Image (cartoon, rainbow, N blue to C red):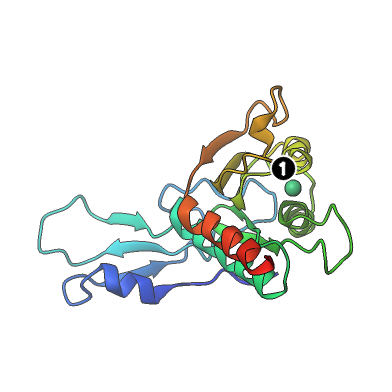
Amino acid sequence: MQAPRKDWGTLSKSFVLNEYEFTKNKANGRNGETGNGGNGASVSDSPILTFSHSPIPLPFPMQLSVYSDDYFMREALKEAQKAFDADEVPVGAIVVCNNQIIARAHNLTETLNDVTAHAEMQAFTAAANFLGGKYLDECTLYVTLEPCIMCAGACGWTQLGRLVFGAFDKQKGYTSLEGKILHPKTKIISGILHEECSAIVKDFFKGKR
Ligand SMILES: [Zn+2]
């Protein structure tokens, strides 16, 4: 398990450091966080920012999370790039719990000679190992491509809390099928960074022709 990456470089572009002083609040369970629910995940590395000196009167302390669906999808895209570089169909996935990345995976079907070794399946196995439990109802799966029927079924079995995917897969995606494949409580967000997520797959198959 890799520790969550802290992309402070991005932050400094977004904020003027001379005007605001950032302090990283590492306290577990503070700032309205709900804690880890006893599932083994920790929020201790979540970079919650506190504006301690603001030129404009703001409700104090004003706190922003740097994390967003775009942020995590970019992490999933990094995994897709690893698959691309390994000559695998470039799909990447990560599992996030309390703003912490608890699993990173990419498609390994060629490497493992296993048609079930999709990015999502690898990510679910890694996340369950991390949490010490098989249900991911407090987790979000970010995956660069719409899950296939097999992986959507696995999303259902894990009772996944939230599914966020990038590009649609009109041919193999689960949304082409009618029926309840996902768990009824799973929230679904689609189209996050879909252009980048789709471009990497198109580039891969362009190179194969
Ligand atoms: Zn799949």
User: Circle 1 — which element?
Assistant: loop
Quarter in which the N terminus is drawn: bottom right
Residue at label 1? 148
Indicate the quadrant where residue 170 lies. Answer: top right
Rendered location of residue 27, percent (x, y): 47, 62
Q: Is residue 100 visible?
A: yes
Indicate the quadrant where residue 16 lies. Answer: bottom left
Rendered location of residue 101, percent (x, y): 60, 61
- Relative height, residue 133 to residue 6 (above, below): above
Rendered location of residue 129, percent (x, y): 79, 58
Quarter in which the C terminus is drawn: bottom right
Which residue is found at the position 34% from the left and 70% from the top? 11
* Left or right of residue 15, residue 8 in this image: right
Label 1 CB-ligand 1 distance < 8 A: yes
Name the outermost residue toward the top.
179
- Relative height, residue 18 to residue 146 (above, below): below
- Relative height, residue 85 to residue 76 (above, below): below
Rendered location of residue 122, percent (x, y): 77, 57
Q: How many dots with numbers?
A: 1
Most foreground residue, 91 or 63: 91
Most foreground residue, 55 or 136: 136
Which residue is found at the position 56% from the left and 34% from the top? 187
Most foreground residue, 83 or 50: 83
